[in-house]
Image (cartoon, rainbow, N blue to C red):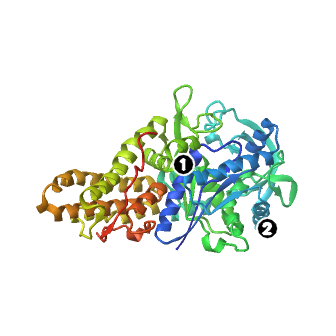
Amino acid sequence: MSRYITTPIFYVNAAPHLGHAYTVIASDVMARHWRQRGEDVFFLTGTDEHGEPVALAAEKLGVTPQELADKNAEHFKTLGPRLGASEDFFIRTSDPRHVARVQEVLERVKANGFVERGTYEGWYCPRCADFKTESEIAEGNRCPIHKIDLLREQEDNWFFKLSAFQEKLEQLFADRPDFVMPPRSANEARAFIERGLHDVSLSRSKLRWGVPVPWDTDQVVYVWWDALLNYVTALSFAEEDNDQTSTYWPATYHVIGKDILKFHAIYWPALLMAAGLEVPEHVLVHGFLLMKDSSGEETKMSKSLGNVLDPFEIIDRYGSDALRFYLLREVSFGQDGAVSVDGFVTRYESELANDFGNLASRSISMVHRYRQGTVLATAPDPDITAVIDPLSAAVSEQIDAGQPSQALETIWAGVRRLNQYVEETAPWGLAKDPEKAAELDRVLTTLIDGVRVLAILLHPFLPVSTATLLATISADGPGDTDLAGAVMTGAFGHEIRTLEPLFPKAI
């Protein structure tokens, strides 16, 4: 089975922040989990390098837009590896191969009769690069996201006939209620459609930094159409001399933030229909990471608002696994949620270090203390297998439903149960009674086997620390992370290694 998952491509008008990391981490967790199941996965991320936000930022810095794009694209390229992400390709929309394919698709859209000339006048946010409808304007003609005054713009542009897709989009949402997830985001998109769709600008006449309109080189393609098409264009050249579009398209999940819902849930499927292409299977929408601004109000983390946390600094201090864990544990995916440095420390110490790290360390330490490091091949406790063995299917179901936070909570229920089991059985007490040697063996085997299964399930979330743990437990070499092995068997009979703390508290 083939799966294709994408993040939004990120504006290069400034360096990455925690909000970008959040999207990449969630997408990576899903991609890694599917690979554990033996599925063929393509994971795409990249940078959105055209449009007014980039041009304005470059002008302010006294550099060309391309120079700014080249500089900041490198920061985003390093983000994935620093996060432990496993993307298959990083696309840049200034890539000539992307530009050429955007022009090809839009020529097809025009040939199919969905492009016309027109004049647009309305309220525009240069930071969103978005012409706002009346329902999207905050009090005082301000952008509700960036809190800035909107500009009144008038341009003679080429228009995309979005209105022609009113009924088709209504039918799409009726036939596929999970096209946009979660349901409240689907309801928001549906409400936008029900208010009536109007034709929208396909090009910009006042901007030079963009993809030239192929039939009118005095204009450039409106950045959103250029950006959205990356999901299709990347597959055609990500691997040299091998167009992978037929293998992976349509996308399984476009993972996006809720502020770009309109473009991905309405504009994007309409454009694909106009070009004769299939629409994606799902658009998965997450909420905002919130931080307090100077007034003490919790607001969306945003470069332009200046209330960001640097993911690189957090990784330097806590490690990439801790960041991955915190973001998906602290904020239920799909909802808004507040984040803070104090929150990192609390989750790190209470759950990573104490709950999971200490469970692994003490289990391995007891095997060395009471059995000279050898775990016997003994049937694990059925009371524990009854809890641990069903976790794999539950986690798979939640990941497939776009619920990585819920999947993490499911796994953590197993972590809590194993910690409880340690206290219930008190291996240190069993070790004092020679007549209870067999019972001690069963307890130790249950603990090590349970920790092994939990490490497999947690591998997409904590790839670095779980790889270390599985290598410690395995008979030789790195431990197997295939999801098929996420059941308790008690099949040991070998010596295991010692383990340094996975999440040291002295940070």
**Which residue is drawn at the image coordinates 75% and 37% (left, top)?**
152
Closest to the camera, between mark 1 and mark 2, is: 1
Q: Compared with residue 262, is residue 215 higher up or lower down, i.e. above or below?
A: below
Q: How far from the left and from the top, in percent, is residue 3?
A: 55, 68
The quarter of the displayed image where residue 480 is located: bottom left
Name of the residue lying farthest toward the top: 295
- On the question of residue 104 being in view, the answer is yes
What x and y, as percent, mark residue 289? 52, 41
- Horizontal side of 470 relative to 20 (left or right) equals left
Q: Amino acid at mark 1?
A: Tyr
On the image, the x and y values in percent for residue 123 come to: 71, 39
Query: What secondary structure is found at the residue carrying circle 1?
Result: helix
For the residue labelled by badge 2, is the local secondary structure a helix, a strand or a loop? helix
Vertical relation: 344 (above or below) 98: above
Q: Is residue 360 left or right of residue 297?
A: left
Are there few (<14), some (14-19), or many (20+) residues within 10 Å of tag 1? many
Nearest the camera: 115 or 62?
Answer: 62
Q: Which mark is residue 22?
A: 1
Query: In the picture, residue 206 is in which quadrant?
Result: top right
Residue 164 seen:
no
Query: Which residue was labeled with disc 2?
Result: 111
